[in-house]
Image (tube, rainbow, N blue to C red):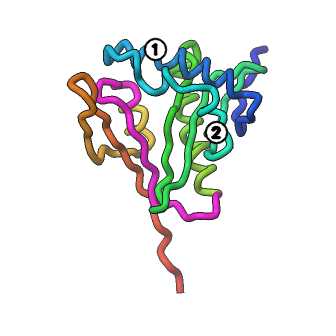
């Protein structure tokens, strides 16, 4: 019988494993855009450790192995920001990315500040990512040209406000 994938809050002990997974996962993005200097590939262990202290970081584990990760935080406008979703290549297309994004949405919604929307971005050529986010209810809000090779597609998912009851 196989092991189940579990999702939990990342700890400082996970930092190196998250960074290695991130490096592995973003290789295909770097190749897609012809840019090996993208921030996920150049992030330092120290800056990731800082993120672990300042932001929400979730990991998916298969046994002791970190096979997925996602980060999130609330901005001053009540927007839950979601980023750095990565799933080990051998674990992709099994719903793990969906589970991680939904878990981060729930984590942000459980915080002290009400969430009015969730926002994330991906590269314009990252068709699989765009499809995933659209399936999860995200809609394109803008496109920002970063370079001749890369544009970021910003996507947002509004949070329905419950009607006040009298």
Reading the chain from its start, which is encountered first: label 2 or label 1? 1
Give the x, y percent position of residue 145. 24, 34
Inspect the magenta stretch and tell me whether residue 128 lies in it.
yes
Classify mark 2: helix, strand or loop: helix
Please tell me which residue is depicted at 50% across the width and 70% down the height of the picture: 162
Give the x, y percent position of residue 125. 30, 24
Give the x, y percent position of residue 41. 49, 20
Give the foreground label among 2 and 1.
2
Query: In the figure, 60 relative to 72: above or below?
Result: above
Residue ranking furthest to the left: 148
Please tell me which residue is depicted at 47% across the width and 19% down the height of the picture: 26
Circle 2 packing at 10 Å, graded few (<14), some (14-19), many (20+), is few
Query: In the figure, 57 relative to 114: above or below?
Result: above
Q: Quadrant of the N terminus?
A: top right
Inspect the magenta stretch and tell me whether residue 18 lies in it.
no
Marks 2 and 1, how far apart in space?
A: 23 Å
Question: Which residue is at the front of the view, 130 or 165?
Answer: 130
Q: Is residue 135 left or right of residue 59?
A: left
The residue identified by callout 2 is 50
**Span colored in magenta:** 111-129
Query: In the figure, 60 relative to 31: above or below?
Result: below
The residue identified by callout 1 is 27
Label at residue 57: none
Circle 1 packing at 10 Å, graded few (<14), some (14-19), many (20+), is some
Please tell me which residue is depicted at 45% across the width and 56% down the height of the picture: 117
CB contact under 8 Å: marks 2 and 1: no
Question: Which residue is at the front of the view, 3 or 26?
Answer: 26
Please tell me which residue is depicted at 45% across the width and 62% down the height of the picture: 77
Classify mark 1: helix, strand or loop: helix
């Amino acid at each position: 019988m196989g092991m189940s994938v579990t999702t939990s809050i990342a700890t400082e002990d996970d930092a190196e494993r998250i960074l290695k997974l991130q490096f592995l996962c973003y290789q295909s993005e770097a190749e897609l855009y012809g840019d090996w200097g993208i921030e996920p590939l150049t992030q330092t262990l120290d800056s990731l450790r800082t993120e672990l202290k300042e932001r929400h970081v979730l990991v998916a584990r298969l046994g002791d192995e970190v096979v997925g990760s996602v980060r999130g935080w609330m901005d001053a406008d009540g927007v839950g920001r979601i980023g750095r979703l990565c799933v080990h290549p051998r674990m992709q297309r099994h719903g793990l990315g969906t589970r991680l994004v939904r878990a981060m949405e729930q984590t942000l919604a459980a915080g002290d500040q009400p969430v009015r929307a969730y926002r994330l971005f991906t590269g314009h050529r990252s068709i699989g990512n765009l499809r995933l986010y659209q399936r999860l209810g995200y809609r394109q809000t803008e496109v920002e040209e970063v370079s001749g090779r890369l544009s970021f597609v910003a996507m947002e998912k509004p949070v329905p406000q419950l009607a006040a009851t009298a």
